[in-house]
Image (spheres, rainbow, N blue to C red):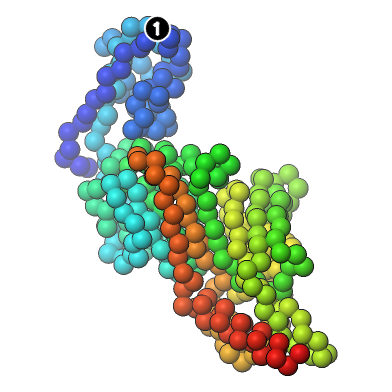
Amino acid sequence: MTDAAPSSEQVTVAAEDTGARLDRLLATRIPALSRSRLKALILAGEVTIGGRTIRDPGHRVNSGDAITVNVPPPEDAEPQGEDIPLAIVHEDDDIIVIDKPRGLVVHPAAGHPTGTLVNALIAHCGDSLSGIGGVKRPGIVHRLDKDTTGLLVAAKNDHAHKSLAAQFADHGRTGEMRRGYLALVWGAPDRPRGTIDAPLDRHPHNREKQAVRPGGREAVTHWEVVERFAAPDGKGKIVPVASLLACQLETGRTHQIRVHLAHIGHPLIGDDTYGPGFKTKTSRLTPDAQAAVEGLGRQALHAYLLIIEHPTSADILEFRSELPSDLARLRQSLAQMSQVAAVKR
């Protein structure tokens, strides 16, 4: 436990707030604390009205009520900090943006209790973390798969967490927030851009996978072709064998891009979970491209773009990340293959 002293917040109910729910009123008057955090404080007996403890978040307040919210010091995070190197793109008092490498799990879970991004952030941020939900921990508002590389933002306090969570829940429908991904896939779509609107749910036979299923959760992915890569088909024709797509998410479901691209017949190169039947496609590649594919050991997906509104300043921040070396090598080898094929055409 931390040795910091508890603090308190004082709120007086205005006439126009008469009849409002206690938790909702406090959420509007104490923006530094999330509504879920305030609800937990009410249930824990940390909120009084006129000296009387109120444990009902739905309690209706009256004009002139004097409300005191006791805010205990945040507890130390349950996960322990670990000295794991981080590629930090941006950091201030509210947020930290990192360029996640392959192989780094974002959050401790079964099978990965340590060695995660959360462990790394706890060690790196130290005392600069304030209580998110009453615990000193980074606020994770979005995740990347273990082997997906690229940009990820985390909150360092409850205020920033609340703001980022709202932006990611909105997915840029009404604000400036955007997430962009680069995906190297098998084959090439027959049009320059498109949208995949297909609901996702747990796979009916493999609970670790997702699948397009009627009645699942809404999932929308926008894609655009950046490059097409061609190779001989063995019958004297030069045909598209792979492509580079830029994808933007309108929702944020588990494995969304991976499942959606496989659903339209263009699974990610190297994705053994959603595109195992495409391994035979490597026989059509040049030796250099084959070696690049075999050396991946992961799905060819990179989060290259992140645009957010800063939680405090409201400035629009834009971050970009170049393809990591393994994907850059694959892209280059496919482009060279395509150039040779064009000369032979």
Q: Position of residue 213 (x, y in %)?
A: 73, 51
Residue drawn at (64%, 73%) of the image: 227
Q: 227 or 55: which is nearer to us?
A: 227
Amino acid identity at mark 1 = Ala
Identity of the residue drawn at 41% across and 20% down: 25
Q: Position of residue 111 (x, y in %)?
A: 46, 62
- Please provide percent x and percent y for residue 279: 68, 79
In the depicted structure, whether residue 303 falls above or below residue 40: below
Asked whether the viewer can see residue 87, the reply is yes
Tell me the residue at 20%/42% (across/down): 2
Judge from the rendering whether residue 342 lies leftward or rightward of residue 90; answer left or right: right
Q: Quadrant of residue 217?
A: top right
Picture coordinates of residue 37 (x, y %)?
38, 32
How many marks the image carries: the answer is 1
52 horizontally vs 240: left or right: left
Q: Is residue 162 above or below residue 256?
A: above
In the orientation shown, which residue stands out farthest toward the front? 343
Examine the rendering and report whether any part of residue 206 can be seen: no
Binning the other alpha carbons within 10 Å of mark 1 as few (below 14), some (14 to 19) or many (20 upward) gives few
Q: Quadrant of the C terminus?
A: bottom right
Please indicate whether residue 164 sits to the left or right of residue 331 in the image: left
Q: Is residue 108 left or right of residue 299?
A: left
Give the position of the N terminus as an image quadrant.
top left
Disc 1 element:
helix
Residue identified by numbered label 1: 15
Which residue occupies the foreground of this view, 184 or 313? 313
Vertical relation: 166 (above or below) 222 = above
Residue shown at 34%/57% (left/top)?
Answer: 90
